[in-house]
């Protein structure tokens, strides 16, 4: 298939470009790239769930925060080896995914969105108020440094985001992707074909939670701090904005969108608290005028001759 | 092959089926007709496991299958082609068909069956890379039937396949259903267009407000003046 080739070419070019960054750009930009990669992995996890399985997760930063705080506790408070902490934090996020997903994914409707949102807000409040346990707004510090150079952190972030992309890509391009999309498009059709919908939704939800948790863990490891910001609603909405800009249900879009937003917002750092306002405006504009995002635009240019514009996903009809 | 015995189904407190019994034999083409709200779709949905009966039993090759999950029923060889097609609009025709073969593992045979299905519906072969949502009503119905066939069912249950189709297309769809039946798939058809259904069916059941009121060969039913008055307006 042509689309498979495009994705392979994308990964290859992306990897080469990323390896060229450290020798060519100033050290400061490496930091922006690392943040972009963490956001990209987080946005990928959101896109996997919303764009393929069709479940909105409005409190997705829950998993990001759980990952970050797991590192904070294990490495910062109890001095566990940071690499081992990452492994444990993955288990923690997956278990929470299981606990929330099991009851919610049996129901059709917005229940998953509501319950993840509720847990995210609860954890956010707890992290802020239980000062003795969580350090309140100060967060948990003293996370052990794992590398001495920013370059090393950069390369690990490249590894993280590429692995996240490949996991998502392999999943959605396999039979599972077909099943996820059928569940999104028409759950009755999936059921009539003999699919046990709940099991597949659970699978998608847990992989998504795992990747979001991994992104959160890495951020804590890199910044050497876990703060309540990692559990904030603003973080979830930045993932949604990134996916909206990049193109929902494309994976590539989550990556492109994350570079664009991170670099643009880096320039607009002086906006401070008005950043949320800017996110919202960009989100509204994208939904109104740019429905398939950057990835949709790129794909349209590359494939329109073969498929015809009317036959593009989401294209042709309003 | 399929035997429904004294089946009772409720929606909450509302009685939908009141002691319905029905028999479908191997390789038969059975039609189930009746007015709106008689319980035809309810009966199919109960057989395919989407609804749980309050009483009675459903026997598949002499073993009880009520209470089994829908996904397991498909594995047993009963496939339902739901009313209103229920396609995945933003997926291609081919992907919709591949989804139909979900319960099967033998890739080679699935590919063979895909070819066979395309022979049955040459129109779909031309359009296999097109998104299902961009097809015409008749073509969508073809995809829906083809998709149910991809699970290699022994019993194909069709729910109103002619709904909203032009008469010419309707006839084409029915001819394909006959062809499917003649190659060894048992068919249980729910249809509002009684005349059309009776041209093709071996036997027919008439369902009215949750009860089977008549069942016989179509030509015998057509011979009864009561039936003709109620269903054909003759």
Image: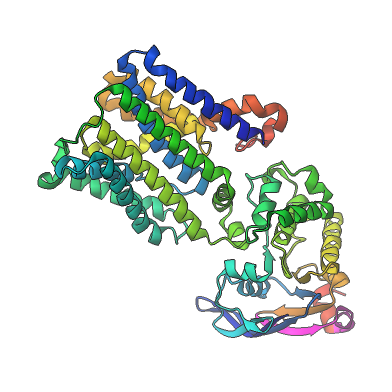
Q: Is A190 rendered above or below residue A295?
A: below
**Picture coordinates of residue B201 (x, y %)?**
84, 73
Residue A235 appears in which quarter of the rendering?
top left
The quarter of the picture where residue B43 lies is bottom right
| Coordinates of residue A207 in the picture (x, y in percent) | 43, 48
Q: Is residue A276 above or below residue B73?
A: above
Q: Is residue B214 left or right of residue A90?
A: right
Q: Is residue A74 covered in magenta?
A: no
Near-viewer residue (B182 or B227)? B182
**Is residue B232 shown left or right of residue B73?**
right
- B70 lies left or right of A216: right
User: In the rendered image, which quarter contains the N terminus of chain A?
Assistant: top right
Q: B27 or A57: which is nearer to us?
A: B27
Q: Looking at this rendering, what residue extends furthest in the left direction?
A: A132
In the image, what residue occupies the spot 20% across and 41% down?
A: A75
> Going 48% across and 22% down the picture, which residue do you hit?
A16
On the image, the x and y values in percent for residue B3 come to 69, 83
Residue B9: x %, y % from top left: 58, 79
**Residue B221 is one of the magenta-drawn residues:** yes
Whether residue A244 is visible to the viewer of this picture, yes or no, is no
Q: Residue at x 71, y 59 (%)?
A: B150
Start-end of magenta stretch: B210-225
């Amino acid at each position: 298939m042509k689309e498979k080739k495009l994705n392979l070419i994308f990964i290859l070019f992306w990897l080469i470009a990323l390896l060229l960054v450290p020798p060519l750009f100033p050290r400061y930009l490496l930091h922006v790239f690392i943040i972009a990669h963490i956001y990209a992995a987080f946005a990928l996890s959101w896109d996997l769930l919303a764009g393929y399985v069709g479940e909105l997760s409005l409190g997705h930063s829950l998993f990001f925060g759980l990952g970050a705080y797991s590192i904070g506790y294990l490495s910062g408070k109890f001095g566990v080896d940071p690499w081992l902490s990452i492994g444990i934090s993955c288990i923690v996020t997956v278990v929470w995914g299981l606990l929330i997903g099991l009851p919610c994914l049996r129901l059709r409707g917005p229940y998953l969105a509501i319950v993840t949102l509720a847990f995210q807000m609860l954890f956010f409040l707890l992290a802020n108020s239980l000062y003795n346990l969580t350090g309140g707004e100060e967060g948990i510090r003293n996370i052990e440094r794992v590398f001495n150079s920013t370059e090393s952190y950069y390369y690990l972030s490249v590894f993280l985001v590429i692995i996240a992309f490949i996991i998502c890509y392999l999943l959605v391009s396999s039979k599972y992707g077909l099943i996820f999309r059928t569940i999104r498009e028409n759950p009755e059709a999936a059921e009539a074909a003999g699919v046990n919908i709940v099991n597949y939704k659970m699978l998608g939800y847990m992989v998504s939670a795992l990747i979001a948790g991994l992104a959160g863990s890495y951020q804590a490891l890199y910044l050497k701090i876990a703060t309540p910001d990692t559990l904030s609603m603003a973080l979830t909405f930045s993932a949604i904005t990134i996916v909206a800009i990049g193109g929902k249900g494309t994976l590539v879009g989550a990556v492109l969108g994350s570079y664009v937003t991170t670099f643009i917002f880096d320039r607009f750092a002086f906006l401070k608290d008005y950043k949320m306002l800017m996110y919202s405006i960009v989100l509204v504009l994208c939904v109104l005028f740019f429905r398939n995002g950057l990835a949709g635009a790129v794909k349209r240019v590359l494939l329109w001759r073969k498929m015809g514009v009317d036959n593009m996903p989401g294209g042709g009809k309003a | 092959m399929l035997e429904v015995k004294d089946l009772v189904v409720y929606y909450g407190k509302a009685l939908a089926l009141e002691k319905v019994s029905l028999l479908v034999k191997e390789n038969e083409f059975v039609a189930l007709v009746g007015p709106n709200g008689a319980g035809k779709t309810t009966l199919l949905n109960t057989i395919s496991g989407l609804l749980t009966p309050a009483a009675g039993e459903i026997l598949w090759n002499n073993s009880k299958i009520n209470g089994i999950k829908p996904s397991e029923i498909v594995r047993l060889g009963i496939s339902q082609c739901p009313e209103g097609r229920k396609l995945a609009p933003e997926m291609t025709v081919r992907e919709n068909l591949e989804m139909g073969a979900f319960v099967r593992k033998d890739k080679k045979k699935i590919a063979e069956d895909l070819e066979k299905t395309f022979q049955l519906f040459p129109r779909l072969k031309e359009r296999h890379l097109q998104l299902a949502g961009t097809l015409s009503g008749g073509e969508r119905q073809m995809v829906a039937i083809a998709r149910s066939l991809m699970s290699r069912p022994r019993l194909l249950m069709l729910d109103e396949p002619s709904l909203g189709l032009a008469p010419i297309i309707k006839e084409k769809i029915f001819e394909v259903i006959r062809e499917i039946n003649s190659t060894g798939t048992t068919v249980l058809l729910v249809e509002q267009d009684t005349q059309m259904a009776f041209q093709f069916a071996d036997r027919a059941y008439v369902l009215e407000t949750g009860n089977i009121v008549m069942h016989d060969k179509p030509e015998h039913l057509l011979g009864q003046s009561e039936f003709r008055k109620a269903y054909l307006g003759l």
